[in-house]
Image (spheres, rainbow, N blue to C red):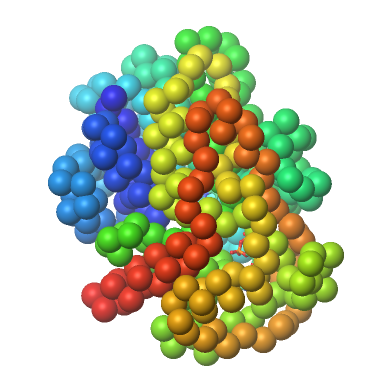
Amino acid sequence: MLILVTGGTGYIGSHTCVELLNNNHDVIIVDNLVNSQAGVVERIATITGKKPLFYQADATDDSVMDLIFSTHKPDGVIHFAGLKAVGESVEIPLMYYRNNLLSTMVLLDNCLKHGVSHFVFSSSATVYGDNQVPFLETMELRPRTNPYGETKAMCERILTDVAQVNPELSVTLLRYFNPVGAHKSGLIGEAPQGIPNNLMPYITQVAKGSLQELKVFGNDYPTPDGTGVRDYIHVVDLAEGHVAAVEQAAPGVHVYNLGTGKGTSVLELITAFEEANNLKIPYRITERRAGDIAECYADVSKAREELGWTAKRGVFEMCRDAWRFEQIYAAEV
Ligand code: NAD
Ligand code: UDP
């Protein structure tokens, strides 16, 4: 298949391009480089031996998207392009609503116009909010009260409504848990700008010495060790989940959790990182972070049964690969 990948030079998109190419699909990347670099295209080519087509373009630009769809006639779209920083979405909500909603609508419109029947959307476990764990696809959505989470729930709604009146359309909503790690080559991975908000990139910055210590946000949650529990998933497992989703797309709306089904606490992740990489991570317990929930992990049975997909890589591998990427990347920039 020929897959149009928006956000394909980003963290999850780049790993998915690699897995698509490794599985003999062709790839066109559309990315405006607001949070990634064009050099990633070359790195994807180095890993796979195949160079994807790349357009530096904005997925909200209808005329450019129309041209790309009519020129290439893709079989499917995977829509990763989006802004994703929760805190920033509270500061500049309009930019988040505009970018995340408009890109989805423009792409969907072009799918209908050009007869493209497969649409895979990057959603998030954030749509479950404070439901009871493990999170099941059938649960009522309770996006946390931030514009980022709202955009994910709204896009799911838009895609579902449009699929209902276009029965030929296949919409797959993939709800990611906490993607971490990097490709084993160390050539692609997560390289956030500035001080990271998320746990794993913060840990790698501390390991590198760029940040002095990790602040553990609260140890009084109702969890086994009191720190927050998340379902960390290796980004390559996540990428493989996308290949399974595009290959098995069928008309209708399909929702899948992509996680491991296993919760890991902040302290457990620190210990795993220290053991996997043989180093120490200084940390200090601080106040809870506003808006955090105690636990977030997936029920993964639906993806296993319907897509035949399960995450294979454990926390040790996630920590080792995250650190390898940080060292190789840091040596270059
Ligand atoms: P990322 O920022 O690394 O990648 C997103 C890419 O989209 C970037 O390369 C950016 O330049 C591009 N982009 C943004 N707006 C665009 C636009 N209008 N037109 C073209 N390109 C645009 O983020 P990621 O971690 O790879 O996330 C990919 C998707 O998965 C996002 O939609 C994100 O919300 C979702 N998601 C991520 C996580 C996570 O923890 N990383 C969790 C759940 C869901
Ligand atoms: N966390 C932390 N210190 C940090 C960043 C995160 O203790 O510097 C905790 C956070 O409170 C949560 C877990 O690590 O319990 C995962 O946070 P992250 O931001 O990576 O993911 P999310 O909360 O969005 O699932």
Question: How many numbered marks, from 0 up?
Answer: 0
Say which of 253 and 89 sits in front: 253
Kindly identify the residue that appears in the image at 54 percent across and 37 percent down. 174
**Quadrant (top left, top right, bottom left, bottom right) of the N terminus:** top left
Q: Quadrant of residue 71?
A: top left
Q: Is residue 250 left or right of residue 178?
A: left
Image position, residue 306 (x, y; %): 55, 25
Image position, residue 137 (x, y; %): 68, 34
Res 135 visible: yes
Image position, residue 326 (x, y; %): 37, 72
Q: Quadrant of residue 185?
A: bottom left
Whether 260 is drawn above or below 295: the answer is: above
Kindly identify the residue that appears in the image at 33 percent across and 49 percent down. 14
Res 333 visible: no
Whether 22 is drawn above or below 252: the answer is: below
Kindly identify the residue that appears in the image at 77 percent across and 75 percent down. 219
Image position, residue 195 (x, y; %): 49, 76
Kindly identify the residue that appears in the image at 84 percent across and 65 percent down. 222
Q: Is residue 130 left or right of residue 124?
A: right
**Quadrant (top left, top right, bottom left, bottom right) of the C terminus:** bottom left
Whether 67 is drawn above or below 315: the answer is: above
Q: Is residue 232 left or right of residue 141?
A: left
